[in-house]
Image (cartoon, rainbow, N blue to C red):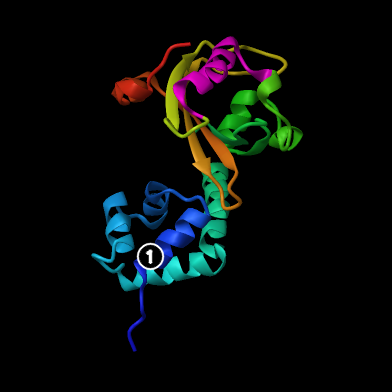
Amino acid sequence: MATVFDGRQLKRWRRAQDIKQDYLAETLGVTQASVSRWERGQQIPAPHLLRIIQSMMAGNQHRTRLDAALKRLVMRSRDCVHLIEDQSHNLLISSAAREAEWQRPQSDLLGVTLWQFATEEIARAEESLDDLGWWDGQIDCLAFPVQGREGPPLRVAPQHVLWERLRLEDGSHVRLTTSIDERTFANLPPSIRYTF
């Protein structure tokens, strides 16, 4: 028996959950155009995607697993990376490489706002987010150089930083903060490279 798929129902659910097409597409590993075709009834998702979509619509279980997977990937990353709540800056998780950079155990910082440790460049970047359209979704990533700071209260190595805004299952936004080298920074699109 074939599973019935209603693209209009997917669209209503997605809008009720305040999920953008591009976010759903990224979550499912497809293009935004595919989601659009599904919602317009021009195409039906592949069977494995249909099962995931139905699971998401039934209780957002898949997105919850994605949140846990994101935290696990950050924690296991070999890169200097950490995840914070986007507005409070409370630390959610960090990689061992980031913990080594900070020269402080992650356990001392979990749930603590990292704003108090911001360098001048990080503070200027944060102050610019409103003008750049960060809070209203005009941009969701930016990169910039940081001079760094040695020693207390928290060591910050000289580096380039990439901020990426992600949305969790509960609708809250988090910021994935990754240290990148100068070459990676130079290869990013100019539209997301800044100097503060």
Q: Can you name the residue that lies furthest to the bottom here?
A: 1
Q: Residue 28: horizontal and vertical position, in percent? A: 38, 57
Which quarter of the figure is the N terminus placed in?
A: bottom left
Name the dominant secondary structure of the magenta segment.
helix
Q: Is residue 164 left or right of residue 123?
A: left
Q: Can you name the residue that lies furthest to the left here?
A: 42
Residue depicted at x 49% and y 32%: 136
Check residue 33 for magenta coloring. Answer: no
Residue 71 drawn above or below residue 109: below
Residue 133 drawn above or below residue 72: above
Number of numbered tags placed on the structure image:
1
Q: Residue 54: horizontal and vertical position, in percent? A: 45, 70
Residue depicted at x 38% and y 65%: 8
Q: Is residue 78 visible?
A: no
Residue depicted at x 55% and y 59%: 65
- Closer to us: 118 or 19: 19
Tag 1 secondary structure: helix
Q: Residue 128: horizontal and vertical position, in percent? A: 52, 17
Q: Please tell me how crowded label 1 is: few (under 14), some (14-19), or many (20+) other residues with Cα within 10 Å.
A: few
Q: Is residue 113 left or right of residue 78?
A: right
Residue 29 position by quadrant: bottom left
Name the residue type under label 1.
Arg
Q: Is residue 32 visible?
A: yes
- In magenta, the rendered stretch is 117-134
Check residue 120 for magenta coloring. Answer: yes
Mark 1 sits on what residue? 8
Residue depicted at x 51% and y 47%: 73
Residue 4 drawn above or below residue 109: below
Residue 178 drawn above or below residue 170: above
